[in-house]
């Protein structure tokens, strides 16, 4: 399952594919894949890994958002 977030109103839901229209604001919004999104502070001291190249990073100063490597989101270990 993938988590999607409406770029417009912030509405978030789990579905295989993003909706064409946002159920919350009713517009044809941009939906952002937030499956691996981690809010600020929840990641500090933890390690993330790139599943493509195997690079591991330890998060020392978390500003929230996504960590990317090889054009993919890194996953929390
Ligand atoms: Zn919306
Ligand atoms: Zn990588």
Image (cartoon, rainbow, N blue to C red):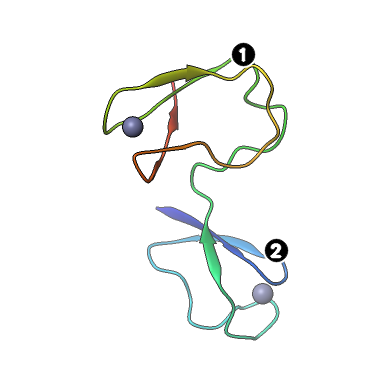
Left or right: 44, with 73 as reference point: right
Q: Residues within 10 Å of mark 2 (few under 14, many from 20)?
A: some
| Closest to the observer, 72 or 22 | 72
Q: What secondary structure is marked by label 1? A: loop
* Residue 45 at x, y percent in the picture: 62, 13
Q: Nearer the viewer, mark 1 or mark 2?
A: 1
* Residue 71 at x, y percent in the picture: 37, 46
* Residue 50 at x, y percent in the picture: 36, 30
**Residue 46 occupies quadrant:** top right
The residue depicted at 50 percent of the width and 41 percent of the height is: 36
Q: Which residue is mark 1?
A: 45
| Closest to the observer, 24 or 68 | 68
**Residue 70 occupies quadrant:** top left
Left or right: 16, with 32 as reference point: left
Q: Which residue is mark 2?
A: 10
Q: What secondary structure is marked by label 2? A: loop
Q: Is residue 40 above or below residue 24?
A: above
* Residue 43 at x, y percent in the picture: 62, 25
**Looking at the image, in which quadrant does ligand 1 appear?**
bottom right
Q: Residues within 10 Å of mark 1 (few under 14, many from 20)?
A: few
Q: Is mark 2 within 8 Å of ligand 1?
A: yes
Q: How many marks?
A: 2
The residue depicted at 64 percent of the width and 16 percent of the height is: 60
How far apart are labels 1 and 2 at the CA level?
Answer: 27 Å
Q: Is residue 30 above or below residue 20?
A: above
Earlier residue among tags 1 and 2: 2
Q: Is residue 65 above or below residue 76?
A: below
The residue depicted at 26 percent of the width and 33 percent of the height is: 52
């Amino acid at each position: 399952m993938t988590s999607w977030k409406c770029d417009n109103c912030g509405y978030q839901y789990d579905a295989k594919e993003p909706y064409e229209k946002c159920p919350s604001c009713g517009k044809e919004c941009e939906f952002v894949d937030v499956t691996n999104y981690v809010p600020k502070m929840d990641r500090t001291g933890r390690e993330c890994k790139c599943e493509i190249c195997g690079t591991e990073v330890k998060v020392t100063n978390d500003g929230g958002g996504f960590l990317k490597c090889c054009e993919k989101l890194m996953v929390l270990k």
